[in-house]
Amino acid sequence: MPKSKRDKKVSLTKTTKKGLEFKQHLVEELRSCVDSYARIFVFSVKDMRNNKLKDLRTDWKHSRFFFGKNKVIRLALGKAKEDEYRDNLHQVSERLRDQRGLLFTNQSQEEVIEYFNSYSEADYARSGNVSKKSVVLSAGPMEFPHSMEPALRQLGLPTKLEKGIVNLSTDHTVCKEGDVFTPEQTRILKLLGEEMADFRLTLECMWSNDGTFTVIDRKDLLKSQKKLSKTKRNKKEENLAID
């Protein structure tokens, strides 16, 4: 029997792996950031999107974001008071879990809180997300090319072709408010241009280079958000009055 061309042995010496050297470099980089920046914020992420975080990194070039590798980050900062790199950094480590990351910055606490209170980027929902509203399609012509009709039927839409035009045979409820999305629902909503996810960062606590550690109260965040909304509303009213 002839030997398969895909039956090839690959030497592990030809592969690269992020091992001990990578982790040591990350530890050094994190500790360098501790020494260089005035504040560290622990943030949690809602509806994580890598492309949105990349854009955020671009907008905040003056600061550094670390997301992922939490075990290595905790090792760099110190897991307990006895081995922490600087005073009270072990409290940062204790709160670094799940979908959480670090923001190293020289911006003031007020500037950071104000920015992230108003920051939110809409995106398409994914399977497992919860629907914010009901979406109902009315029977009739749909703005899709005729070639898509079979795919729409596979997604569960009651469609048919009439003279080369995609038609919805009956009214169809894509989702109801509070529904947990299925893969089919998210694909339909994306085709319809319905964005039901919000990429958002929530600040959890702050460490300052003088060793002080502060848990950020959600009530304070809400007050700051309301104040910001009121300020924006007043400015809008002033601009309308000028016009």
Image (cartoon, rainbow, N blue to C red):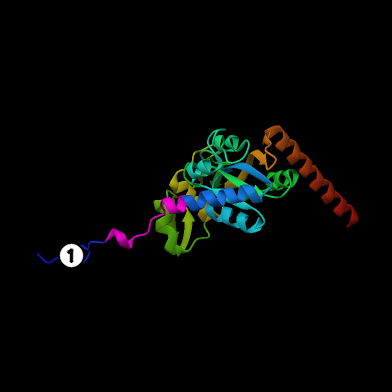
The residue carrying pointer 1 sits among few (fewer than 14), some (14 to 19) or many (20 or more) residues within 10 Å by Cα, namely few
Q: Position of residue 96 (x, y in %)?
A: 55, 39
Which structural element holds mark 1? loop
Seen as rendered, the residue at the extreme right is 242
Instruction: Tell me the residue that label 1 is attached to.
Output: 4
Q: Nearer the viewer, residue 178 or 62?
A: 62
Q: Residue at 70% across / 46% down in the picture?
A: 112
Q: In the image, is 183 to the left or to the right of 220?
A: left
Q: Nearer the viewer, residue 30 or 174?
A: 30
Q: Position of residue 27 (x, y in %)?
A: 52, 48
Q: Nearer the viewer, residue 90 or 109?
A: 90
Q: Position of residue 237 (x, y in %)?
A: 85, 49
Amino acid found under the numbered disc labelled 1: Ser
Residue 208 appears in which quarter of the rendering?
Answer: top right
- Magenta segment: 11-23
Is the C terminus in the top left, top right, bottom left or bottom right quadrant? bottom right
Q: Residue at 75% across / 44% down in the picture?
A: 110
Q: Position of residue 4 (x, y in %)?
A: 18, 65
Q: Residue at 65% across / 53% down in the picture?
A: 63
